Image (tube, rainbow, N blue to C red):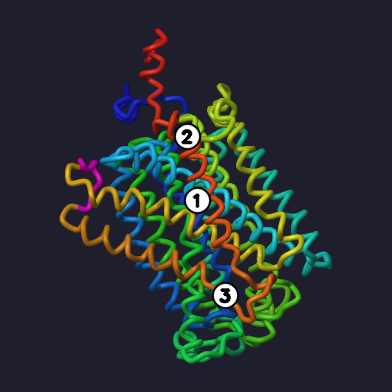
Amino acid sequence: MSTDEERLAQLGYKQELHRRLSGFSNFAVSFSIISILAGAITSYGIAMKAGGPVAITLGWLFVGIMVTFVALAMAEVCSAYPTAGALYWWAAALAKKNKPAWAWFVGWFNFLGEVAVTAAIDFGAAITTAAFLSLTFGLEVTALSTFLIFLVIIVVHGLLNTFGVNLVRVLSDVSAWWHLVGVAVIVGILAVVPDQHKPISEVFTEVYNATGFTFAGAGIYAVLMGLLMAQYTYTGYDASAHVAEETHDAANAAPRGIVLSVVVSVIAGFILLVAITWSIQDYEGALGTELGLPPAQIFIDAVGKDLGVFLLFICMVAQWFCGMASVTANSRMSYAFARDDAIPGSRIWKKVNPRTGTPTNSIWLCVTLSTILVLPSLWNTVAYFAATSIAVIGLYIAYVGPVLLRRLSPDFEPGPWNLGKWSAPIGWIAIVWVGIICVLFVLPPASPITAETFNYTIVAVAVVLGAATIWWFASARKWFTGPKQNLLEKAHHGEPTD
C-alpha cells in the first residue's frame, strides 16, 4: 500500500478515485482555474470602470499579496488532511465543538462558491468567444447569443470531464503551458507593435471613476470596488486540495499546488495587466466597446484587427481550459460532500464510474446548477458582476473557516508541509483580509441604485446561509454527523477494506 493510500485510510477513506495526477498536474488544475487569461480579461472592465489603471495594476499586486497569505494558511491545513472533501472536512477535523455544524456550513459555502465560480468562468469564456466570433464571422453579440455559447462551452466541459482523470491531467498540463506562453506572447506583442503607449506613470497612478458615485472620496471607493477584478481572478485554487485523492504525494504536492498557483499568477498576471493597460489607445472607446469585452478592443486599437484577433484567440482558448478545470474541482467537492450525505440525492451524486474513476453524476449536477445561475444574464446585465461576487464571498468564507479553526486549535498536528513559526501571523492576516472583502463586495457597485445596478450578492449569500440554517435546525442536525468514514462502513458490513 502506498503512503498516499495509507494516509487516506487513516482519514477513514478507501481509495476509490484513480490516483493519476503528478505534483505539476495538481498545480496546473489550480493555476488553470485562477487563469489570469480568464478572470483578469473577462472582469477587466469592472476595474476599468471602478478605479481605473491604479486598481488594475497596483490593485492586482496588493490583492495578490493578501491572497498569498490565505493560500499559505490553507496549504498548511491541506498538508495535514489531504482529502477531496478539503475545506468542510478540515472544519470538522479542527472544530472543538459542533463539528457537524462547522462541516455543514463551510461545505455549503464551498459548494455555492464552486458552482458560482464555474458559472462565472464559463460565462466569461462565452463573452470572450462572442467577441471573437463577432470579429471573425460578424456574429451579433446579444444576451441570447452569449448564453447559447455559454451552454455549448459548459456542456463540452461536462463531457470531457466524464471521460476520465487521464484526459483531465493532459488538458491541465497543456493549459498551464498555454497560459504561461500565451502571456509571454501577448506581453511581447503589446510591448513592441503599438506606435504609442499610455504614459507609464498613468499606468500605475491614474484613477478613473465611472461608478456614478460623486461623494467626497468616491475615487477611493471606486478603487476598492475595482479590486473585485483581482479578487475574483484569485479564486479556485482550493482545487489542488479537492483533487488530493487523485494526486501522488498529496501531503506535499497539494499544498505546493495551492501556493504556487497563486504566486505564479500574481507575477505573470501583473506583467500581463501592465502590458494591456500600457497599450490603451482610447480609454472611453474600449470601455464602451460593442464587443462587450474591453481588452478585445484594446488589442485591436493597439496592434490592428488581425493581430488583435490572434491575441483574443489566445485568451479564448485559455478560458476554455479554465472552465474545464473548474468543472473538475467543482465535481470533486460535490462528490465528497455527497459521500458524506450532505446534498439532496447524495446516493446519486456520490457514485463513481468504475470504468473512468470519475464521479460522473456529480459532474452533471455541477453543470446543471451553474447553468441555472447564469440564466438571469438573459434579462439582467449585472448578472456577471453578481456571479463573480458570489464566487468570491462563497469561496472565501469556506477558505477562511478552517484557517480560523486551525488558529483556535492548539493541538493541531501539522503535516509535512507547514509554516512553522510563521503560521500564526500568516493565519490571522488571512482571516482579517477575508473579513474585509466579505464586506467590500456586497456594497453597491454603481449609482443610482436600481434593479439593474443593485448588487444581488448579499441576497444570494443570505439565501444560501438562510436555507442552510433552516435545513440544519429543522432536519440536518439530527442526521448529518460530518465526514463519514467509508472504510469503517465497509468493515461494519463485512466488506473488504483493502
Residue 421 sits in quarter: bottom left
Residue under numbered circle 1 = 465
The reply to whether dot 3 and dot 2 touch (C-beta < 8 Å) is: no
- Could you tell me which secondary element the residue under label 2 belongs to? helix
Q: Pointer 3: what residue?
A: 445
Residue at image mark 2: 476
Is label 3 in a helix, a strand or a loop? loop
Question: What distance separates the C-alpha of mark 3 from that of mark 2?
Answer: 36 Å
**Residue drawn at 46 percent across, 61 percent down:** 234
At 34% across and 29% down in the image, what residue appears? 8
- Amino acid type of the residue tagged 2 in the rendering: Ala
On screen, residue 375 versus residue 265, left or right, reads right
Query: Marks 2 and 1, Cα distance to the nearest angstrom?
Result: 14 Å
Residue 189 percent coordinates (x, y): 58, 75
Mark nearest the camera among 3 and 2 is: 2
Give the residues in magenta. Answer: 412-419
Q: Earlier in the sequence, mark 2 or mark 1?
A: 1
Alpha-carbon distance for marks 3 and 1?
22 Å
Is the stretch drawn in magenta largely helix, strand or loop? loop
Q: Earlier in the sequence, mark 3 or mark 2?
A: 3
413, 346: nearer the viewer: 346
Reply yes or no: does residue 50 show up in magenta: no
Q: Nearer the viewer, residue 276 or 124?
A: 124
Task: Note whether 274 is above or below 261 in the view shown.
Answer: below
* Residue at 46% over, 25% down: 16
Q: Residues within 10 Å of mark 3 (few under 14, many from 20)?
A: many
Q: How many marks?
A: 3
Tell me the crowding category of disc 1: few under 14, some 14 to 19, or many 20 or more residues within 10 angstroms, Cα based: some
